[in-house]
Image: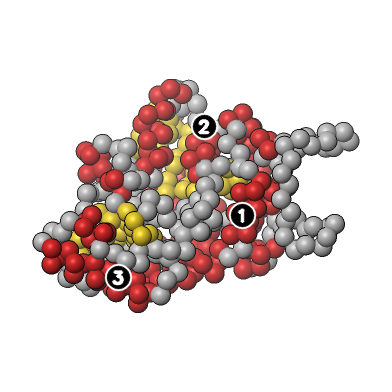
Amino acid sequence: MKNKTIAIHKGTLRDLKTGGVNTPIYTSSAYNYLSKDETFYPRYFNTPNQDAVAKKIAAFEHSQAGLVFSSGMGAMSTSILAFAGAGDHVVMLDALYGGTHHFATEWFSHFGIECKFTKTSADDVINGVTQKTKVIVIESPTNPLLAVVDIKKIAQFARKEKITTIIDNTFASPVNQTPLDLGIDIVVHSGTKYLGGHSDLCCGMVACSHEKMKKILSLARVLGPSLDPRICYLLERSMKTLMLRVKEQTKNAMEVAQHLSDHPDIARVYYPGLENFEGHEIAKRQMNGFGAMLSFEIKDKDPNQFIEGLNIISPAVSLGGVESTICSPSLTSHAKMSAGERLRIGVTDSLLRLSIGLEDADDLKQDLDNALKKVSHSS
């Protein structure tokens, strides 16, 4: 199946009683166990609605198995802890999502895990590896600076060294990037973003081989970050339009990024699709599209006043929805990092992260221009 067909049909459980085309919602938390090969239970991640979504993400990511979680951090933390424990070493990018960074800095020591943070380059990641390294965690493009790392180079090195690789593929989505095809072991998503796509769900997903999934599932059943069947149903429904949404959002993002890069009031634009972007050539090799996320810095103006001047684009902490949203990472996604840590990885107080939605691109550009004019008049 091609992706558009996968989006509609993969994982769907037909309603044999009524002939309905959608997966029914199975609300039971108690199932008959007699004459069954396995016991069904929501915390076991094996109920029909959970399975329907898991099969769809597995097909999208070209993996053998998938699993749906109650949050992206539930998916990421479980995946890491399944392969790293006391005495082990983990290599992570400096520029990972703030929640993942916080998990490492605040909680790894409780599990006896050591961690090395590196710059967003394959060589720096490889040089950060020690004899104790069991897991490498990367993100590409990164949140919020959209930096791109050579996924294939890291994956090939890790395979030789028998190190498990995990990538946060949230920003790209499986529409624009399939890391398992590049040699990565485990793909993690905050399904709250593009997979849900309507800013009304909280969920996470993992895609990997059957072998890797056995360990992740075993730990997940103990930790218990499973997803309610009603949310699974809504998530499956949303994923049916994933291809259409992300392709159009990606197209809009390129237009907006080019517009901002030419604007006299903008100091810098971070977007892999721009030819002058540092990671552009790598992105061209490993991505099908450059994604719908971008970041930028305003010249000598108050970013909060700028945000308040927007009419169409909404200030919000999440991303990936059908509506365009904007936020200051220093106040939201990376607020738990110290000011020094943020400055070290390039997350300045003037940096703004923009999630492009499905509005008309011309309207978005006009909204940005109008807000910039308001700030300049008030200065």
In the picture, the disc for residue 81 is 2
Between residue 121 and residue 224, name the one nearer to us.
224
Q: In terms of secondary structure, where does tag 2 sit?
A: helix
Q: Quadrant of the C terminus?
A: bottom left
Q: Report the residue at 22% width, 44% height from top.
A: 343
Q: Which residue is mark 1?
A: 234
N-terminal of the pair, mark 2 or mark 3, is: 2
Between the C-alphas of marks 2 and 1, the distance is 28 Å
Q: Nearer the viewer, residue 153 or 268?
A: 268
The quarter of the picture where the N terminus appears is: bottom right
212 vs 344, left or right, is right
- Say the numbered circle drawn on residue 367: 3
Give me the C-alpha separation between circle 1 and circle 3: 31 Å
Please tell me whether mark 1 sits on a helix, a strand or a loop.
helix
The image quarter in which residue 335 lies: top left
- Looking at the image, which residue sits at the far left? 379
> Tag on residue 104?
none
- In front: mark 2 or mark 1? 1
Disc 2, disc 1: CB below 8 Å?
no
Spatial distance from mark 2 to mark 3, Cα to Cα?
A: 44 Å
Does label 2 or label 1 sit earlier along the sequence?
2
Q: Is residue 8 visible?
A: yes
